[in-house]
Image: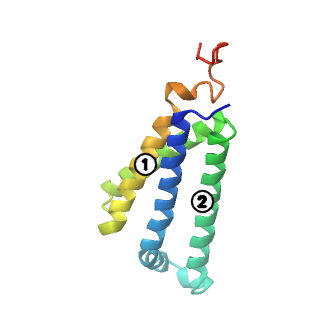
Amino acid sequence: MERPVSIVWFERCYLGALVLGVLNTALSWNTLMAQMAAQPNADKFGAGFGATVMIISLAIGVGISLLLWFLAARKHSVVAKWIITVFFVLGVLGLLFQIIGKTFPSGIAGVVTVVAWVLNLIAVYQLFKPDTEVWFGEKKPDQGGHVL
């Protein structure tokens, strides 16, 4: 089955947002390390512990995102579609808490955050367009390949 245009756009936006997220982590690295060092008992585990935790967390997050991308965009998984959607909604809530708590990043990190958020919004929207219904098995095509 040929991938619908919406799935192609989903991939572009979702993977673009993922790359921006990794870039944003790199841009915010010193701030993140300072926040971790400021936590009570931070020195209990050694100086490099925070960096190790951040790298492992980033790797797991990227791995999960790539798995969900693969399942939705290549394996037609409606479950992955909904998990991506739930993660997006949770991300919106996190973004709102950052804005309310005045912890939203400033400067280039803030701009990258907004661009990544917009790309994720577009990506999730693409998953719910009519041309994806056959892709995800939510509707069956007729003999001419049109959606019934």
Q: Which residue is mark 1?
A: 119
Q: Which quadrant is home to the C terminus? A: top right
Residue 131 x %, y %: 54, 26
- Kindly identify which numbered label has been placed on residue 131: none
For the question of whether residue 28 can be seen, the reply is no
Left or right position of 34 against 83: left
Q: Earlier in the sequence, mark 2 or mark 1?
A: 2
Tag 2, which secondary structure?
helix
Quarter of the view holding residue 101: bottom left
Q: How many marks?
A: 2
Q: Residues within 10 Å of mark 1 (few under 14, many from 20)?
A: many
Instruction: Say which amino acid is labelled 2.
Output: Val
Instruction: Say which amino acid is labelled 1.
Output: Leu
In this view, the mark in front (2 or 1): 1
Residue closest to the eye, 55 or 116: 116
Q: CA distance from mark 2 to mark 1?
A: 16 Å
- Kindly identify which numbered label has been placed on residue 62: 2
Residue closest to the eye, 56 or 130: 130
Q: Residue at x 32, y 55 (%)?
A: 99
Q: Residue at x 66, y 25 (%)?
A: 137
